[in-house]
């Protein structure tokens, strides 16, 4: 798991994306410790079906923004279906942190200009 830090492209890309989407309004440093339940999309009073729908919509938006807006590509052996299988459960879990979501994004996507691990 990458530490929540400004030198990790998964962290900075996720933070700027969530900030621009108005999902959070905290600074970068404080945002890693935010719970999913503190993000705007999360509706604690919704039904299970409503929560699942919101998580799927958010996962879809993140995937599209990362790939088409931010130049990320899937890591080897990852496709859209696998990306959604990883992102949606995190987005559904009220106690997961933004840092957890960044860690998952780091495993799923190779971000533009991110160094290649050899």
Image (cartoon, rainbow, N blue to C red):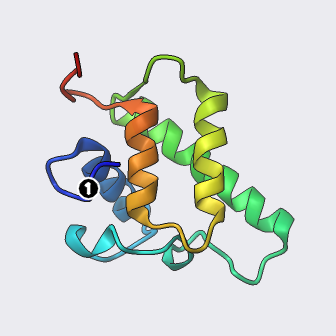
Is 8 placed above or below 112 here?
below
Which residue is pictured at 50% across the width and 79% down the height?
38
* Location of residue 67 (image quadrant): top left
- Give the side of residue 62 with respect to residue 2, left or right: right
* Location of residue 79 (image quadrant): top right
Residue annotated with mark 1: 3
Is 51 placed above or below 110 here?
below
Which residue is pictured at 66% across the width and 63% down the height?
92
Which residue is pictured at 39% across the width and 51% down the height?
102
The picture places residue 99, in percent across and down from the top left corner, at 37, 60
Which residue is pictured at 51% across the width and 39% down the height?
63
Residue lying at the far left of the rendered structure: 7
The picture places residue 35, in percent across and down from the top left corner, at 48, 74
- Give the side of residue 75 with respect to residue 95, left or right: left
Tell me the SS state at disc 1: loop
Residue lying at the far bottom of the rendered structure: 45
The picture places residue 3, in percent across and down from the top left corner, at 26, 55
The picture places residue 100, in percent across and down from the top left corner, at 44, 58
- Give the side of residue 69 with respect to residue 82, left or right: left
Label 1: few (<14), some (14–19) or many (≥20) C-alpha neighbours in 10 Å: few
- Give the side of residue 62 with respect to residue 24, left or right: right
The quarter of the rendered structure image containing the C terminus is: top left
- Total labels: the figure holds 1
């Amino acid at each position: 798991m990458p530490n929540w830090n400004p030198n990790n492209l998964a962290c900075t890309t996720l933070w700027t994306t969530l900030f621009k989407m108005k999902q959070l309004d905290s600074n970068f440093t404080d945002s890693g410790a935010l719970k999913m339940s503190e993000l705007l999309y999360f509706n604690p009073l919704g039904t299970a079906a409503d929560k699942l729908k919101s998580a799927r919509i958010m996962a879809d938006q993140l995937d599209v923004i990362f790939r088409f807006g931010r130049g990320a590509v899937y890591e080897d052996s990852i496709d859209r279906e696998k990306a959604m299988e990883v992102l949606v459960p995190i987005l559904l879990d009220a106690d997961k942190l933004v840092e957890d979501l960044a860690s998952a994004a780091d495993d799923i996507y190779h971000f533009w200009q991110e160094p290649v691990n050899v």
